[in-house]
Image: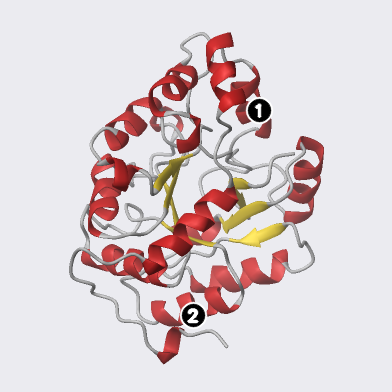
Amino acid sequence: MIDVDVNTHIGGYPWRPVPHPDPAVLARVLEREGIASAWVGHLPSAFWRDPTPGNAELYAALAPFAQLRPAPSIRPDWPGWERALHEAVDRDAPVLRAYPTLWGMPPGDAAMTALAHACAELERALVLSVRFEDSRQRHALDVAPDLTPAHIRALARETRVALVVVNAGREFIEDVAWSLTPEERARVWFDFSWVWGPPEDHFATLLRTLGPERFVYGTGWPLRLTQNARANVDLVPRDARALLQHTPLASGVDVLASARRGASEPQSGPVPFQHTEHFRTP
């Protein structure tokens, strides 16, 4: 049994129809695939100027499904983002989502740094998506660039936030991982929904070089088939399978434990976010 799918969404997609984007279907898919729970974002609000109304839709839609945990979107350059963050904590959202390139934020953006500091202090992990679709299939109006390794490096170096990077390929993952110190790298995880399996065997290569502990299970539902991630695991060569048997993939528990540790670690740089009564949960 897999403890959590870290990369799922519900809701429609602006550039093409997607099949079965509703939470009831996702819940059935998790049961079929042997996955205990999922961190679920609201796909439409990734493309809205203000994602806060989408968070309200997300909370309401997931309420009947205990195995579906909300991953609300927080846009830190938008008025009232602190209230949205406070509500996410009140609703026990385990992680938060952000989409810097969709919001026009470059690497090292002060607002994203503030959000990362806030996540670390509030013991929440931050999920960042590299892309939704391959550039070759994108709609002509879908002009937002992919997230860059520099975005991840800036947050990993300047804050103590636990980061989950989803929809990244092998080159992106290697660029990030080998440019961080071991301490910084220990706070960054990757899903492998966009990593090639056979015949290129990119996933096996990453398991050999970075280790299984840097990877978490994510499928990219509903924009990608849930079977892709499982096939990647099932089809690794014998030596990589031995690695997985010795050191399993990281779990959602590992990510959240790192988020809790990050809240107690001393901050090495200036902290632009200050914890106030507004953010304290009852």
| Residue 196 drawn above or below residue 182 | above
Can residue 252 be seen by looking at this rendering? yes
Residue 196: x, y in percent?
Answer: 49, 20
**What is the distance, in whole Å, between disc 2 and disc 1 at their CAs?**
35 Å
- The front one of 190 and 225 is 190
> Which residue occupies the extreme left position in the image?
270
Q: Which residue is mark 2?
A: 86
Can residue 125 be seen by looking at this rendering? no
Residue at 77% in and 38% down: 34
Residue at 62% in and 15% down: 235
Q: In the picture, which quadrant includes the C terminus?
A: bottom right
- The front one of 273 and 16 is 273
Q: Secondary structure at mark 1?
A: helix
Q: Residues within 10 Å of mark 1 (few under 14, many from 20)?
A: some
Residue at 46% in and 75% down: 85
User: Given the image, on which type of amino acid does mark 1 rest?
Assistant: Arg
Please indicate whether residue 140 sits to the left or right of residue 58 in the image.
Answer: left
User: Given the image, on which type of amino acid does mark 2 rest?
Assistant: His
Q: Secondary structure at mark 2?
A: helix
Residue 114: x, y in percent?
Answer: 29, 69
Residue 49: x, y in percent?
Answer: 40, 67
Quadrant of residue 77 within the rendered picture:
bottom left
Please indicate whether residue 42 sits to the left or right of residue 136 in the image.
Answer: right
| Residue 116 drawn above or below residue 201 | below
> Which residue occupies the extreme bottom position in the image?
277
Residue at 40% in and 82% down: 80
Residue 12: x, y in percent?
Answer: 61, 52
Q: Residues within 10 Å of mark 2 (few under 14, many from 20)?
A: some
Q: Which residue is mark 1?
A: 230
